[in-house]
Image (tube, grey):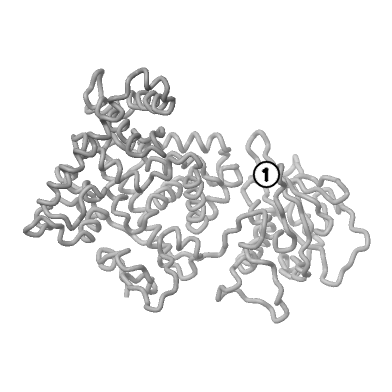
């Protein structure tokens, strides 16, 4: 491999910082008996991959990323700086020729091992990056670095796109002798490779609808909801009129079954009320002496009291001292500890309860609505945090498909883990939007349309809206985190919702969407004997599970 790296020249200012460039000087039939590290000029060095011992991903204090290669002789090579991203592409390319295994003691150190097969048969020379030879490459780089570097790398991009496609992709072509190519992304250790080259169509224009403002006409004479799916679609499209939220939320959160009659709901309320107060009495009857010997309950009480005192105090329902709304918050959360001993209380749950209590204005109803909400998000609060890690990984998969350039930039600034989105996902954007907006947002998310991970598509929509702030900027990890935190109360909910739905439709219309991305947005259906239903068409028919999408999608997005 042969690398060009930048050297400061006081007589030349290209107006940008050059990215890495890769040019191969290895010929297919060329064998070197002694493969030392060789500096071919002040701008470059070369090293056979067979002599590469390790590489380390590092970062300057100012936020610039770089890689350090070490030869098997123990000699570190000049560091490669990445000012505009590109580490992922380089590492992916290397993994087609060598195995990179993470060090068990250092997460940023990777050890290099050769593949058994002759993977170097297709060298970078064969890509013909520079059609007129490379003898004057350095001089052309000095004279016109932008045209030279990026002109060549437009071809590297196409090479990566083909080389990194899954073997079963219809667009992945192999030569007749290429029967033992590099292993698939799932088999290569050291990195989680996400398939490149997904070509998405344009984002569709999405319009929002009017809030659900009628209720009785959707009920039969005995009070059953005649068409729950239609209700969910209307709520997803436009939310709910405030006066109807108290009724509709109980169905969305599972307090009442959709097919229950008025009489059955009266019985359910009576039964649930009795059950609630039995649990409340359990913790209310604990004496101070008993609590002194119950560190778990004592810890829950202390944490709840602290969180309640600072939850939505700007809202009149919870403002002021000795507010009865705060007492209800406290009692419902303490009772939830009795309902779910395993989980108990975790910081953030007060944020979920406050809007429920505000809308229902009822202690019992708010409690059972909270249990329904927690059924959707309880894994967010588990001590292992595995669910949160999984969601951040899923968000990364979505961003890789929707905006790989933005994700690569964030990764170049050590922000590729998207950990700054943790709070968004933990409490479903509760701190990012106004209280009234949260009421509208959550009822949309509770419909679970068009998929259960719609909140991840919302997060992707927010990140995409900030790409102009990030791409080409001098942000580092700290300033990226600061900027994301400062988005609080500055986002327009309807714009974000439109962007999230457009993201879903754009992905759903992709013919080559990776299976992992399909799984995230609920489009992957294991093969069955009978074909799944088709509910809408973009440029082609997209198979979806029955009931997953409804007529609202078909009517709005079917294209001839």
Is 484 rendered above or below residue 111? above
Residue reaching furthest to the right: 33
Q: Is residue 67 visible?
A: no
The answer to whether residue 360 is left or right of residue 3 is left
Q: Nearer the viewer, residue 352 or 466?
A: 352
Is 223 rendered above or below residue 473? below
The residue under the point 36% across, 73% down is 532
Q: Quadrant of residue 228?
A: bottom left
Classify 10 Å Cα crowding around label 1: few (below 14), some (14-19), many (20 and above).
Answer: few
Is 463 rendered above or below residue 529? above
Image coords of residue 227 (percent x, y): 18, 61
Q: Nearer the viewer, residue 291 or 236?
A: 291
Q: Which residue is mark 1?
A: 107
Image coords of residue 424 (percent x, y): 42, 41
Q: Nearer the viewer, residue 420 or 135?
A: 420
Is 286 rendered above or below residue 103? above
The residue under the point 41% across, 39% down is 342
Image coords of residue 196 (percent x, y): 57, 62
Q: Is residue 28 visible?
A: yes
Classify mark 1: helix, strand or loop. loop
Q: Quadrant of residue 11?
A: top right
Which quadrant, please, contains the N terminus? bottom right
The residue under the point 23% across, 27% down is 325
Which quadrant, please, contains the C terminus? bottom left
Count of residue discs? 1
The answer to whether residue 541 is left or right of residue 24 is left
Image coords of residue 466 (percent x, y): 45, 45
Residue reaching furthest to the left: 221
The residue under the point 57% across, 38% down is 477
Q: Nearer the viewer, residue 495 or 554?
A: 554
């Amino acid at each position: 491999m042969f690398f060009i790296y930048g050297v400061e020249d006081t007589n030349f200012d290209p107006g940008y910082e050059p990215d890495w460039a890769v040019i191969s000087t290895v010929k297919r039939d060329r064998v070197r008996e002694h493969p030392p590290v060789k500096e071919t000029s002040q701008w470059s060095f070369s090293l056979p991959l067979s002599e590469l011992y390790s590489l380390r991903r590092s970062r300057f204090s100012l936020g610039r990323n770089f890689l350090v290669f070490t030869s098997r002789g123990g000699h570190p090579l000049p560091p490669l700086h990445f000012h505009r991203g590109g580490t992922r592409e380089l590492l992916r390319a290397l993994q087609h020729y060598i195995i990179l295994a993470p060090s068990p003691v250092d997460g940023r150190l990777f050890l290099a091992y050769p593949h058994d097969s002759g993977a170097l048969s297709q060298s970078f020379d064969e890509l013909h990056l520079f059609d007129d030879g490379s003898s004057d490459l350095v001089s052309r780089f000095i004279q016109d670095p932008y045209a030279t570097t990026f002109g060549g790398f437009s071809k590297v991009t196409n090479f990566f796109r083909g080389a990194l496609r899954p073997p079963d992709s219809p667009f992945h072509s192999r030569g007749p002798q290429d029967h033992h190519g590099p292993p698939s992304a799932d088999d290569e250790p050291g990195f989680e490779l996400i398939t490149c080259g997904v070509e998405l169509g344009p984002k569709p224009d999405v319009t929002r609808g009017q809030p659900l403002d009628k209720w009785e006409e959707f009920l039969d004479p005995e009070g059953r909801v005649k068409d729950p799916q239609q209700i969910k679609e209307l709520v997803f499209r436009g939310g709910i009129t405030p006066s109807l939220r108290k009724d509709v939320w109980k169905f969305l959160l599972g307090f009442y079954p959709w097919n229950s009659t008025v009489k059955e709901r009266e019985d359910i309320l009576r039964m649930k009320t009795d059950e609630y107060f039995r649990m409340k009495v359990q913790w209310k009857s604990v004496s101070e002496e008993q609590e002194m010997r119950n560190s778990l309950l004592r810890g829950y009480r202390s944490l709840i009291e602290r969180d309640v005192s600072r939850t939505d105090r700007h809202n009149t329902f919870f403002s002021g001292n000795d507010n009865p709304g705060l007492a209800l918050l406290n009692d419902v959360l303490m009772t939830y500890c009795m309902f779910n001993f395993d989980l108990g209380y975790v910081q953030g749950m007060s944020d979920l309860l406050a809007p429920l209590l505000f809308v229902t204005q009822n202690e019992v109803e708010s409690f059972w609505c909270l249990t329904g909400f927690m059924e959707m998000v309880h894994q967010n609060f588990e001590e292992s945090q595995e669910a949160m890690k999984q969601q951040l990984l899923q968000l990364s998969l979505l961003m890789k498909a929707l905006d790989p350039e933005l994700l690569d930039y964030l990764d170049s600034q050590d922000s590729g883990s998207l950990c700054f989105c943790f709070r968004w996902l933990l409490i479903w954007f509760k701190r990012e939007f106004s209280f009234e907006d949260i009421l509208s947002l959550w009822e949309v998310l509770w419909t679970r349309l068009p998929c259960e991970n719609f909140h991840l598509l919302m997060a992707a929509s927010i990140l995409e809206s900030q790409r102009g702030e990030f791409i080409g900027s001098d942000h580092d990890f700290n300033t990226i985190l600061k900027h994301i935190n400062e988005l609080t109360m500055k986002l327009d909910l309807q714009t974000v919702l439109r962007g999230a739905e457009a993201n879903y439709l754009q992905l759903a219309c992709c013919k080559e969407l990776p299976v992992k991305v399909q799984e995230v947005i609920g489009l992957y259906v294991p093969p069955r004997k009978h074909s799944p239903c088709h509910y809408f068409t973009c440029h082609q028919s997209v198979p979806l599970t029955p009931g997953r999408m409804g007529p609202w999608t078909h009517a709005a997005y079917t294209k001839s």
